[in-house]
Image (cartoon, rainbow, N blue to C red):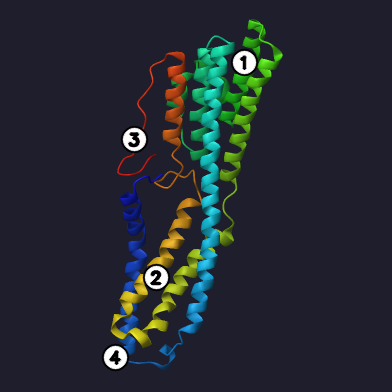
Amino acid sequence: MIVGRRAGIARLLTESVRPLLVLFAWDIIVVLLFQLAHRSWMDQPALPYSLIGSALVLFLSVRNTTAYNRWWEARTLWGGVVNNTRSFSRQMATLLDGAPDLTRAMIAYAHALRGGLAGMDVSPDLQRFLKPEFIERVRQHRNQPNTILYEIGVGVRARAIEAGVHPAAQAAIDRILSDLANAQGGLERIRNTPLAIQFSALPRMLVRVFCVVLPLSMVQELGWITPFGSTLVGFLFVALDEIGADLESPFEPGPHAVPMSAITRTIEIDLCQAIGDPAPEPMLPVKGVLA
């Protein structure tokens, strides 16, 4: 996630520079053809392009709003995971004398959830917090985060019966686990349901086509300075398209993804400190990007 304003602007310009250079070169070709070898087909009225551009902006705005809603929902669900893991550690401390092994398993759950969403191997993190026999049971299942959460629930029930915890208090812990399962289901829904092809592929194609025909509507009025005017307008459309494309997949590794590594590090710090284990330092942005 980009947290620095300068880094965000610089990255947007970097991602847009290649199509803009191509557009600028095409604008120069159009100007040369119009000024030096005028063709009748180049006498295009500006009004149709203005109307098409207005409609395209509305289309891109709807797509970008949808993409941002996906990204923000993912971040909100991760916030629920953070809050519920903290509540879980507090319940372990007040009802089950800390239960450090279950608290460490909850840290492993957060790392497993991050790995499952990003499609990456987090085995080293699991080995830091889970016992070998626990890891073997987890590896036998496809959905590792759900398996860890299930094992935590079984462990909580056994500890609660052993400690004589009142069923109402045990139900409160179970609600926390249910909230975590609900948040995980929401995150998996976002990961498994990509943005509709009408919103993901069509806008990029329309923007490219519009930028190709754009100088034809300007060259009669702007003449030799058409490349500058056309490239400036084209940059607005390319930037809008790039913003939506960056946000539609919130879990893919990259500068625009939800900062799952930083979030899980926060969970690890809070829960390790709750049981007295050494806690790592929080993650800091690198060149304006928080991973």
What's the residue at 51%, 41% (across, down)? 75
**Quadrant of the frame with the C terminus:** top left
- 22 relative to 98 in the view: left or right: left
Q: CA distance from mark 2 to mark 3?
A: 35 Å
Sooner in the amino-acid sequence: mark 2 or mark 3: 2
Q: CA distance from mark 3 to mark 1?
A: 34 Å
Whether residue 121 is situated above or below residue 202 in the rendered picture: above
Q: Quadrant of residue 9?
A: bottom left
Q: Amino acid at mark 2?
A: Gly
Which residue corresponds to mark 4? Answer: 36
Q: Quadrant of residue 174?
A: top right
Where disc 3 sits, the SS reads loop
Which residue corresponds to mark 2? Answer: 234
Q: Amino acid at mark 4?
A: Leu
Which residue corresponds to mark 1? Answer: 156
Name the one closer to the observer, 126 or 64: 64
Query: Which numbered mark, 1 or 4, is in the foreground of this view?
Result: 1
In the rendered structure, are the residues bearing label 2 and label 3 in contact, judged by CB atoms less than 8 Å apart? Answer: no
Q: CA distance from mark 1 to mark 4?
A: 81 Å
Name the one closer to the observer, 208 or 272: 272
Residue 139 location (% of width, % of height): 55, 25
Residue 185 location (% of width, % of height): 62, 37
Where disc 1 sits, the SS reads helix
Whether residue 152 is situated above or below residue 80 in the rendered picture: above
Which residue corresponds to mark 3? Answer: 284
Where disc 4 sits, the SS reads helix
